[in-house]
Amino acid sequence: MNAHQSHGEQLLSINGVELCVETFGDRATSAIMLVAGAGASMLWWDAELCERIAARGRFVIRYDHRDTGRSTCYPPGQPTYSLTDLALDVLGIQDALGIERAHVLCQSMSGGIGLILGVDHPDRVASLTFVSTSTGADDLPPPSSDLAMPAEPDSSDAAALVDYVVAGARACAGGSPYFDEAAIRALAERDVARARNYASTLANHYAIEFDEPTQGGFGDIAAPTLVAHGDHDPLLPLPHGEALRDAIPGAELLVLKGAGHDLPGPVWDDLVSALVRHTEEGDMEEGGTEEGGTEEGGTEEGRS
């Protein structure tokens, strides 16, 4: 097995629940926690993307949120946890894996998780990366008028669930030339089959308490921060990413050309190069870490 490949899934007892965790790469290198968006299991961080990051000298961790994949789930519409609890799950995984500080990459809704970690737990965060997320300011543009999300299906019909996931992914791609329906369908089939209860996956992250940090907001983040945002994003148009960059001191923006509210394969090279360079800077700012990688990152097109 190559050193950057998966070490296999494991169920860990974290904060009174079971979370399914999978790691890639050398445990002696800098750790990167991948925190998926609403209703997204670890599978939405493609294994090949994880391997590419690990091959660049990083220890990659992906996991199933509560109510996704193989992790603990609650009755549909009845979650008993908050966004802060999901943030504490990240720290619990770090503790279980013996990681004091990690680089944290958050996508979409989990930008709120990254905010809580960066503001309330800065000693545990070496750097932050926000993908396809927003400050949530009222003056930012609404979703595209072309965004047509499908009606939710009967959760007992696996084929209908797969069709629903594919249709939602197609809508969120925003007309991207990179949308790969066959790949998304294969992923959706695995996701639906693997979940403890996909009805909970569809409902519960939208029913939780979206609490905020106790210590401040985006302007109080001190960790080195990278913002990555697709220029085809129909759900959170590019000005959301620009506003997030402007709200966080010293943050940089990587525009993912051709991407929607997703991470299609053709933008991975740019993202991985940016992430390697960014996490090296985070390690150097802290005087290096025990897990610190040494590989040089490239310069990305689309940075602004």
Image (cartoon, grey):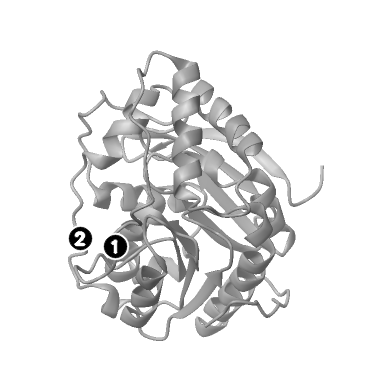
Left or right: residue 24 versus residue 92 is right
Q: Secondary structure at mark 1?
A: helix
Crowding near pointer 1: few (<14 within 10 Å), some, many (20+)?
many
Q: Is residue 142 visible?
A: yes
Q: Nearer the viewer, residue 126 or 45?
A: 45
Amino acid found under the numbered disc labelled 1: Ile
Q: Please give the residue where the numbered disc 1 appears in the rendered image.
A: 116
Residue at 71% over, 56% down: 52
Q: Position of residue 175 (x, y in %)?
A: 52, 52
For the N terminus, give its image quadrant: top right
Dots 1, 2 in contact, CB < 8 A: yes
Q: Position of residue 117 (x, y in %)?
A: 33, 63
The answer for how far apart the CA atoms under marks 1 and 2 are is 6 Å
Query: Please, is residue 139 above or below residue 185 in the view?
Result: below
Q: Nearer the viewer, residue 237 or 80?
A: 237
Crowding near pointer 2: few (<14 within 10 Å), some, many (20+)?
some
Residue furthest to the right in view is: 1
Q: Is residue 195 visible?
A: no
Q: Secondary structure at mark 2?
A: loop
Left or right: residue 183 versus residue 194 is right
Residue 80's label in the rendered image is none
Residue furthest to the top in view is: 156
Q: Please give the residue where the numbered disc 2 appears in the rendered image.
A: 212
Query: Please, is residue 7 above or below residue 217 in the view?
Result: above
Q: Position of residue 100 (x, y in %)?
A: 47, 62
Query: Please, is residue 162 above or below residue 184 in the view?
Result: above
Q: Nearer the viewer, residue 92 or 112?
A: 112
Left or right: residue 116 versus residue 162 is left
Amino acid found under the numbered disc labelled 2: Glu
Left or right: residue 13 versus residue 188 is left
Quarter of the figure with residue 267: bottom right
